[in-house]
Amino acid sequence: MSPYDSESADRLVTAAADGEDQAVEAALRPRLLDEFIGQERVREQLSLVLQAARQRGTAPDHVLLSGPPGLGKTTLSMIIAAELGAPIRITSGPAIQHAGDLAAILSSLAEGEVLFLDEIHRMSRPAEEMLYMAMEDFRVDVIVGKGPGATAIPLELPPFTLVGATTRAGLLPPPLRDRFGFTGHMEFYAPAELQRVVHRSAALLDVRIDPAAAGEIAGRSRGTPRIANRLLRRVRDYAQVRHDGVVTAEIAARALDVYEVDARGLDRLDRAVLDALLRLFGGGPVGLSTLAVAVGEEAETVEEVAEPFLVREGLLARTPRGRIATAAAWHHLGLVPPAQPGRGAVPAQPELFGPDGARTAEA
Ligand code: ADP
């Protein structure tokens, strides 16, 4: 069976949270807006929304946070509650199967409470419809009884703030989207921002690390704080077991080479896909299913687990004729692009390609 059956599989560079992440993340989450690194635009906009609500003494508008996993949506929802001095209730779309589940949560909210609804696009339809009314009028209709005798009993709710999070804002029905007063779009983090995240987490975990080492980890973290924190923990293990615990850039690079996360954040599967595309198919175009057979994976795994990051990094392109590698992909694996596409690879002199190319060529 493939070890990559889903994005949440045991993969060091997945953005999904695993059990260990959940246990450690609580300690690493920034508590206030000022401690939250990066996402300047969202932070400034949110700060205005919260400050205005505080001045008026009312609950702020409902907030929608959209963006890929691991970028800080849950963290921001907790910060919103903390900045308002309000309690927070955390649930998720898939946990709400029936409208009754949502009614139970809503009717037990305290005044001003923040309700964080993760994966809001995965809520059931009836629950979604109940949410419309709750968001707009702070009221729900609870249906009592069944069949012709069923009656709707209106139930007043205390004012609350819904913070919805979604990885797919486009999947939200417009009536739901329209009921949010503010939408924050989270972007992948720049390396310098991730470097600050690593530094901050290292301090909280009591890990001694130099700035270059934090930069090395940041560069391999795919723009995602959750991955940066996870890589930091693996580097910490390596530094502790093989050295004196202090993390230098060289130790960080060596540790992450052991875990097969390369200088650009590609792991073994990503590299296998690129390698097959370049060496076996001369850079493409090649069909997805052929590429998948070549790396011994399901087409779905290649398409959903490996390709999104390769596309984002500009290493692979999906075209109507099949997958093709970009010039950057050849360079990344230390190969020279053929003069004519599709004519095979020539091993390159690693030193031609700078530190990234050199390291990956040696690996
Ligand atoms: P999401 O809900 O978007 O999946 P989380 O809020 O759970 O992401 O964040 C994942 C981890 O990344 C948390 O442990 C948090 O500590 C860290 N993190 C996310 N964003 C930031 C940030 N801007 N600054 C510092 N740490 C962050």
Image (cartoon, helix red, strand yellow):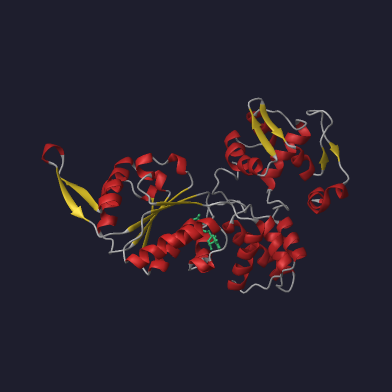
- Residue 318 vs 115, above or below: the answer is above
| Rendered-image quadrant of the N terminus | top right
The percent position of residue 39, horizontal first and vertical second, equals: 55, 57
Query: How many numbered circles does the render carry?
Result: 0
254 to the left or right of 13: right
- At x 79%, y 29%, the residue is 341
The percent position of residue 64, horizontal first and vertical second, equals: 42, 51
Q: Is residue 87 visible?
A: no
The percent position of residue 197, horizontal first and vertical second, equals: 60, 64
The percent position of residue 297, horizontal first and vertical second, equals: 63, 37
59 to the left or right of 226: left
Give the quadrant of residue 250.
Answer: bottom right
- At x 29%, y 56%, the residue is 105
Q: Is residue 257 visible?
A: yes
Q: Nearer the viewer, residue 305 or 43?
A: 43
- Which residue is most to the top? 321
Give the quadrant of residue 293.
Answer: top right
81 to the left or right of 221: left
- At x 26%, y 49%, the residue is 100
- Which residue is most to the left? 149
